[in-house]
Amino acid sequence: MFTAISGPQTCRIDPRDRDYWAEVRSRFILEPGHAYLNNAALGMPPKPVQDSVAEGFRLMSENPSKAKRVFHDYIEGELRPAMTGFLRAKTGEIALARNATEGLYHIINGLDLAPGDRILMTTQEHPSAVRPWKVRSERDGIEIREVHIPSPLAGEDDILERISEAIDERVKVLFFCHVTRGGYLYPVKRLCALARERGLITAIDGAQAVGMMDVDLTEIDCDMYTNSLHKWFLGPAGTGFLYVNHAMQPSFSSLYAPASEPGGDARHYEIQGTYDLPVRAALGTALDFLNRIGIDNIERRLRMLSDYLRKALLDIPRLRLLTSLSHDISSPGSTIFEFDGINAARWRGPLEEEANLHVDDHDRDGHRGIRISTHYYNTTDEIDRCVDKLKEMLRREG
């Protein structure tokens, strides 16, 4: 029942090959007639992942003693090394978690910070990522400073300049998204280099990055990185990871392991006790599914679909595209837009109820718009359906 995780696909696949991507789509069990365009909220695991979870719980019911052993052997002997390789981390740098938010709570509570120390973040962070920093701020007197990043983005250099100007002697940690909720792509390697030059710790919220594009943690060269694997990676709900590089670990405390225990292993940062073993083990199936397609092929497919979507949206009257057409500052998957004089955020319900189109609202930064997040199993036909329905909604508004 446990998946032998294949190596990454190296053959280049045409992102417009209808037959190939239709075969991939056939491995998903979405209700007929529905177009799921909200992958940035929660990914849609393929059927093999669903089957893996079900089989895992069956094994636990049939023979719990055996199940504990075989799950442990698979997770430690195959899954963790494979995930470490996929992320280009080093052995002992990956802790498995339930989601990016859980990883952030570990980060925030494991850092040695004193009253008056400052955390620098941007105004584009996820609300669920800001909340744990506020908890630590209230308890320990650390300060949070937000750097305003305009929406739409002005460019990589503008982001670097705004953050650089906000760094002072009290700032200890630079925290930022790899990809924002709205699909803005931050220059993560340049930000990490800036932080190193200024002696700052770097912590990255990668919830919207892993699984849509190649993420090389060694190349990014951050101190910590956390992700929800049930989004673009298409793992089961309640899966994620926390990366802590070896250089950071000696000064980064664990909530679950005493300081007297030998260091050098990020497993010290994992919650102790019984956890949902079948769900975690199914990450192996999700990684195998992804590897058989290839992360480079996935990113090219996502770019093709989002470029198609963004160009189609430009033909809709009164629509303002907030996501850049430039790949340098936009994610491969998420697209946000608004309409002049219209609160389009309230269209999310009618789009789903009337047309089986699943999208999300984008009601922040002064926008009342919509977010569409396309994954590799989506099609240009589904995008056309969505664009036609948006035009119909606009006509209703007069």
Image (cartoon, rainbow, N blue to C red):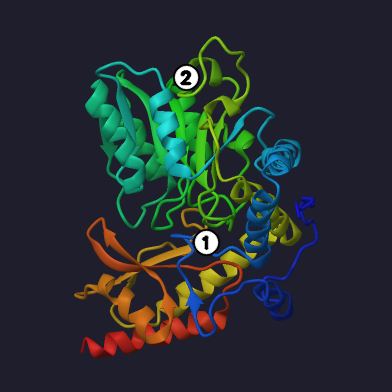
Q: Secondary structure at mark 2?
A: loop
Task: Give left or right: position of 6 versus 252.
Answer: right
Task: Give left or right: position of 391 versus 263.
Answer: left
Q: Residues within 10 Å of mark 2 (few under 14, many from 20)?
A: some
| Residue type for callout 2 | Ser
Picture quarter containing residue 75? top right
Does 15 appear above or below 155?
below
Question: Disc 2 marks which residue?
Answer: 253
What numbered label is drawn on residue 375? Answer: none
Numbered circles on residues, count: 2
Does 110 appear above or below 215?
above
Dot 2 or dot 1: first in sequence order is: 1
- Percent x, y of residue 209: 53, 51
Q: Residue at x 46, y 43 (%)?
A: 100
Q: Quadrant of the N terminus?
A: bottom right
What numbered label is drawn on residue 43? Answer: 1
| Residue type for callout 1 | Gly
Q: Quadrant of the C terminus?
A: bottom left
